[in-house]
Image (tube, grey):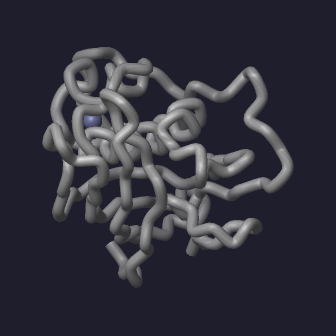
């Protein structure tokens, strides 16, 4: 089972994200795979072009849930650039290396708070289903993530990992 602890002692948002202390993303951040606008969005929210696509392209996320969905989609597509761009400067790791064997297959949003005009903070509770294509292992990551408003958009601050079970 993938682990969540980082070398820096921070909880990482997803088990396949290994934090490599002291390295940088560099100028050639991996933008991951691309999807057609009409393709189903990996987060399950509809067509990619009207769901997470605009956020991964650099547009604002209207709510903590929208940012959460875009980050799940970025993990699913291997878009390290968006993961870094959507991470709060106070907690963003120096480097992030995704495990190619882990496929993020489905997202369940259990609860989402924040996103109204006056809100500065938000939380999203979710379950992210993964499969390791090397081992065939499947699992679920349960997390309550915290978000902070940043202008017109939101940033991921950190998350509390819940005990996980099998898918
Ligand atoms: Zn989406």
- Count of picture labels: 0
Give the residue displayed 43% in from the left and 74% down from the top.
161
**From what the image shows, is residue 127 above or below residue 70?**
below
**Viewer-side residue, 138 vs 71:** 71
Give the quarter of the figure containing the N terminus: bottom right
Give the quarter of the figure containing the C terminus: bottom left
**Viewer-side residue, 120 vs 8:** 120
Residue 129: where, in percent of width, then height? 35, 61
**Viewer-side residue, 165 vs 147:** 147
Query: Is residue 127 rendered to the left or right of residue 95?
Result: left
**Viewer-side residue, 75 vs 147:** 147
Give the residue displayed 41% in from the left and 26% down from the top.
56
Residue 12: where, in percent of width, then height? 57, 62
**From what the image shows, is residue 51 above or below residue 155?**
above
Ligand 1 quarter of the rendering: top left
Residue 69: where, in percent of width, then height? 31, 43
Give the residue displayed 51% in from the left and 59% down from the top.
14
Query: Is residue 29 rendered to the left or right of residue 163?
Result: right
Give the residue displayed 27% in from the left and 54% down from the top.
122
**From what the image shows, is residue 63 above or below residue 125?**
above
Query: Is residue 163 rendered to the left or right of residue 32?
Result: left
Residue 118: where, in percent of width, then height? 18, 43
């Amino acid at each position: 089972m993938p682990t969540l602890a980082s070398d820096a002692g921070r909880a990482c948002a997803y088990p396949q994200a290994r934090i490599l202390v002291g390295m940088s993303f560099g100028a050639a951040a991996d933008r991951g795979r691309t999807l057609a606008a009409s393709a189903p969005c990996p987060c399950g929210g509809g067509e990619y072009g009207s769901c997470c696509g605009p956020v991964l392209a650099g547009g604002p996320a209207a709510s903590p849930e929208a940012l959460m969905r875009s980050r799940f989609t970025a993990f699913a597509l291997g878009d390290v650039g968006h993961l870094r761009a959507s991470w709060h400067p106070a907690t963003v790791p120096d480097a992030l290396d995704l495990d190619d064997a882990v496929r993020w297959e489905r997202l369940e949003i259990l609860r989402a708070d924040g996103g109204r005009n006056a809100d500065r903070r938000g939380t999203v509770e979710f379950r992210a289903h993964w499969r390791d294509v090397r081992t065939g292992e499947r699992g679920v990551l349960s997390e309550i993530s915290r978000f902070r408003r940043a202008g017109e958009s939101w940033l991921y601050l950190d998350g509390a990992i819940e005990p996980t079970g099998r898918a």
